[in-house]
Amino acid sequence: MRKPELLTRLALIPCILSGLLLSISSYAQQQGSAQDWLEKMISAKQHESYSGVFTFIRGKDFNTMRISHENRDGLVRENIYQLNGVTRNLLRKGDEIVCYHDATDPGELEHDLPLGPFSQSFSELLTSFPDGYRLALRGRGRVADRSAVQLSVQPRDNDRYGYRLWIDEASGLLLQSHLIGSGRIREIFQFSQVSIGEPISDDVFSDVPVNAVSHHMSVNLKESDSAPSFKVKWLPNGFKTVRTSGNRLHFSDGIATFSIFIAKAKRLPEMATEVNGKAVVTRLLRGNNGQITIVGNVPIQMAKKVAESVEPVIY
């Protein structure tokens, strides 16, 4: 290669690099920031209509659910049907939820809402605690044959877990999530099939299962006029009381959640363990004034520290 030709090509390198950096910068601006995608996901959870099949794995629990979710003029309707194990069918209209069980084999009637991440956080509370987590875009992926943006939500301390999220690029709906703690995946949610924005028949939300027993559940706990008989002296930064119901308090930082409740008599041995992927800590209140129990998707050491700070209230 002649020297003049070589010099010409070398002179073009800065221009090529500049154009490449400009393209990358333009692509990043089009994609939006990590905060933008988190807010888009929160909005999609509230306003999008969708149907599909998802799996939810936590601890030893492995469930596959068929879901139809509609938001029509602000009214949320939902039908969730468990495809494995004991038959459960949840029909939701607004804040009212009725869970139907097969009458011949109803299983346990006292259970959490099996809604996967739809019952969890990623709420507006996170906006009020921006310093608790580091948000970062991690490229693109593919879930349920849909293009997704990957987002990591990493805690800045050891008092909570982190998440890896796959957000639908077109709608913002959460397609997949991994709850990560101590370097391992502790919980998995994933759509295997999903349709977003398509009309859903009214029959899906009104067909009541036959030969079934039912019980009512609620998305939101009812407020209680009575004050709790205990106080919590220490909470990790960013956690706030989001619901009070008698001697039960619920806390969240916008992502992690846990609850504290008190029993007048001792029901369980003192322990600090995990049950179905959730931390469970019990201890006696000082002065033998009942037993405190903490349950949530938080590290055990954090739950123990909160439990040790709980004291009875003397009126």
Image (spheres, rainbow, N blue to C red):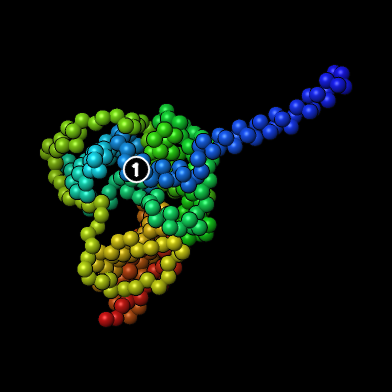
Q: Residue at x 15, y 35 (%)?
A: 207
Say if 21 sits above or below 310 in the image. above
Say if 223 sits above or below 138 in the image. below
SS at mark 1 in the image: helix
Residue named by callout 1:
45
Horizontal side, residue 103 vs residue 29: left or right: left
Question: In which quadrant of the rendered view does residue 146 lie?
Answer: top left
Q: Decide: few, some or many residues near mark 1? Use Cα within 10 Å; few <14, some 14-19, many ≥20.
A: many
Horizontal side, residue 208 vs residue 154: left or right: left
Say if 156 sits above or below 266 in the image. above
Horizontal side, residue 105 vs residue 166: left or right: left
Q: Position of residue 25 (x, y in %)?
A: 59, 37
Which image quadrant: the C terminus? bottom left
Number of dots carrying numbers: 1
Q: Position of residue 92 (x, y in %)?
A: 21, 44
Q: Is residue 143 visible?
A: no
